[in-house]
Image (cartoon, coloured by chain):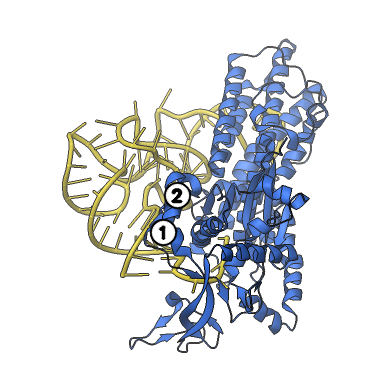
RNA sequence: GGGGCGGUAGCUCAGUUGGUCAGAGCGGCAGACUCAUAAUCUGACAGGUCGUGGGUUCGAGUCCCACUCGCCCUACCA
């Protein structure tokens, strides 16, 4: 029997030379939540992230610091990039580095194969070149003087048009096929705004694009031309293939992985690199005769003070700054809850603080406290058996069914905010239920003992479902909640709970040991000026 | 220059194919309650000429045109 196809999600590989900021973490968290959700659907999942390590900037930075580029990359990966994954609690299955042997081999195989199809040819590249930067500039970056001369924005000196002999990828040959692909697969680029942008770009007509550089040395050498390296994008994009065993010998474990993993189900990308993923990348795959990714999803920017974060403006915020204060779960929750995936969203400490307090501390966390404290106080921590469900109880169960359906449907659209909204509605309903049923009043009258049992059970069983639904978003605290409910004895690990079964009522076994503890999401002091600056 | 997206209550934003669509959350105001993290719940409370100006239509945040403001892409920053 063939292995099932894995649900394969990727993040962009991050450029090592940048300092990791919450924008990078945002993408990684989204992929992590998505894959955890799919694991709880029972899917086979493969989640990939990694680093992009080639190019002039890296080489120059290494030399400036007096080390070899490889050492420079090793250091950045180990001290900066891998730790971020820990910080945000990402459970990626693999981490690909473009300087790894498996990647470089794969890149060379890929381009050799494409060259054999006739889609790579030798040509002349001409562009504005800045001697100071030692690199070609993008025409749009140049400062145009009234007399027509163009200046490098960095060195404020005139650029000159320089030609070099490069190898070109015959992108133009794929224009029609790309359009046909996107017409036949409207979800292949999402959201709709991104699709529009891609399609109108393709319709303008595509030019062949240079896929090698002779002026750069820190890169993957062309197998057929030792003077040139692969242009970084046409090296970097291939990580999605090389990481899962592209080009491995048939019969090997790697080859099997490739067969059961490719094509990717979702490439998560920032909207700035949409074109590479939705135009060049599928064209490359077409040239190589490989299946196309099912979807490229372009998310928006995190804005700070209304502006895109940037290193040069020093508005980049390290994930640990936020995680140290709020914790990784709140980090994961906040960015996916407050911002509609696909759109830009503003981050501010104040907004995060407000939402944390309202939704996690006062909403979900407090609900958990009320439930566990009452079972502890009224029943010595032993979950009672429900006696008779009233219409109110049954209505709440219906609400749960609706919440699970809404959340699961939202996740299909990568609508994280929608999934969290649907779940939060249920939290509010349970809080309302508790207030109306007044178990503290029932506890005062022996005649209400059965009713109290039922209400307490409904509260805890509701929390059981909430823990499952929130687990992909907030694995640490939901695991804690799971154990406070005493759920693992009867139900097993929380990560093993299936989304589809979440709304089936009555899973938490009566008799479970319920324990109260410190608040799941303690109220926090306002972030200090120092933290917020 | 070309292309794309956005401008809806004080704040952050939802609003499928045009007709209870003028909404949610937060904040504000009023009340209830005390199990809980000074948390929770209720309100048939307050708050918007849905960027501007035209147009199509019996009827438009919702379609068309123009304008304006903001953001993004246009060969290596999520």
Between A138 and B60, the one lying in front of the other is: A138
Residue drawn at x 37%, y 86% as measured from the top left: A145
Task: Kindly indicate which chain is depicted in blue in the rendered structure.
Answer: A
Query: In this figure, which residue is indicated by the disc labeled 1?
Result: A202
| Image quadrant in which the C terminus of chain A is located | bottom right
Q: Which chain does the numbered disc 2 sit on? A: A
Q: Are marks 1 and 2 in contact (CB under 8 Å)?
A: yes
Q: Position of residue A289 (x, y in %)?
A: 56, 54
Between A351 and A232, the one lying in front of the other is: A232
Query: In this figure, which residue is indicated by the disc labeled 2?
Result: A182
Residue drawn at x 69%, y 66% as measured from the top left: A104
Against A287, residue A9 (above or below) is above
Task: Kindly indicate which chain is depicted in yellow in the rendered structure.
Answer: B
Against A443, residue B25 (above or below) is below
Q: Position of residue A477 (x, y in %)?
A: 73, 42
Q: Secondary structure at mark 1?
A: helix
Q: Position of residue A223 (x, y in %)?
A: 66, 71
Label 1 crowd bin: few (<14), some (14–19), many (20+), radius 10 Å:
some
Q: Position of residue B4 (x, y in %)?
A: 38, 56
The reply to whether residue A79 is in sight is: yes
């Amino acid at each position: 029997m063939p292995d099932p196809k894995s649900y394969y999600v990727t993040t962009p590989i991050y450029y090592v030379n940048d300092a990791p900021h919450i924008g990078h973490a945002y993408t990684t968290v989204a992929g992590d939540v998505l894959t955890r959700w799919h694991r709880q659907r029972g899917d086979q999942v493969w989640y990939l992230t990694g680093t992009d390590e080639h190019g002039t900037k890296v080489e120059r930075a290494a030399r400036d610091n007096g080390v070899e580029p490889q050492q420079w990359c090793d250091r950045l990966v180990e001290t900066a990039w891998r730790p971020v994954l820990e910080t945000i609690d990402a459970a990626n299955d693999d981490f690909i580095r473009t300087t790894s042997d498996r990647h470089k081999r794969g890149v060379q195989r890929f381009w050799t194969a494409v060259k054999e199809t006739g889609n790579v040819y030798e040509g002349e590249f001409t562009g504005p070149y800045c001697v100071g930067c030692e690199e070609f500039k993008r025409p749009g970056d140049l400062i145009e003087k009234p007399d027509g001369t163009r200046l490098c924005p960095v060195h404020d000196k005139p650029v000159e048009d320089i030609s070099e002999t490069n190898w070109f990828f015959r992108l133009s040959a794929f224009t029609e096929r790309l359009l046909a692909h996107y017409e036949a697969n409207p979800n292949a680029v999402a959201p709709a705004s991104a699709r529009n942008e891609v399609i109108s770009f393709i319709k303008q007509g595509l030019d062949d694009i240079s896929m090698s550089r002779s002026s750069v040395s820190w890169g993957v050498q062309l197998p057929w031309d030792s003077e040139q390296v692969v242009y970084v994008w046409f090296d970097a994009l291939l990580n999605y293939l090389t990481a899962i065993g592209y080009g491995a010998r048939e019969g090997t474990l790697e080859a099997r992985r490739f067969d059961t993993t490719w094509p990717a189900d979702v490439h998560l990308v920032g909207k700035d690199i949409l074109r590479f993923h939705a135009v060049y990348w599928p064209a490359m795959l077409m040239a190589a005769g490989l299946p196309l990714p099912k979807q490229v999803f372009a998310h928006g920017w995190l804005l700070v003070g209304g502006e895109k974060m940037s290193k040069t403006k020093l508005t980049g915020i390290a994930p640990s700054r936020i995680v140290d204060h709020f914790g990784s779960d709140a980090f994961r929750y906040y960015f996916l809850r407050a911002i509609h995936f696909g759109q830009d969203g503003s981050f501010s400490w104040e907004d995060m603080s407000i939402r944390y307090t309202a939704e996690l501390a006062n909403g979900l966390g407090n609900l958990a406290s009320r439930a566990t404290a009452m079972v502890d106080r009224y029943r010595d921590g032993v979950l009672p058996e429900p006696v008779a469900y009233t219409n109110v109880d049954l209505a709440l169960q219906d609400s749960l069914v609706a919440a699970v359906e809404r959340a699961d449907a939202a996740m299909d659209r990568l609508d994280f905010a929608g999934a969290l909204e649907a779940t939060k509605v249920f939290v509010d309903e349970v809080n309302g239920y508790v207030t109306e049923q007044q178990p503290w009043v029932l506890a005062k009258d022996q005649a209400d003992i059965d009713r109290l049992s039922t209400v307490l059970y409904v509260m805890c069983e509701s929390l059981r479902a909430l823990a499952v639904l929130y687990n992909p978003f907030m694995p640490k605290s939901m695991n804690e909640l799971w154990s406070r409910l005493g759920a693992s004895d009867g139900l097993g690990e929380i990560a093993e709970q299936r989304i589809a079964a979440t709304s089936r009522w009555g899973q938490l076994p009566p008799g479970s040991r319920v324990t109260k503890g410190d608040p799941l999401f303690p109220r926090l002091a306002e972030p200090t000026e120092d933290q917020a600056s």
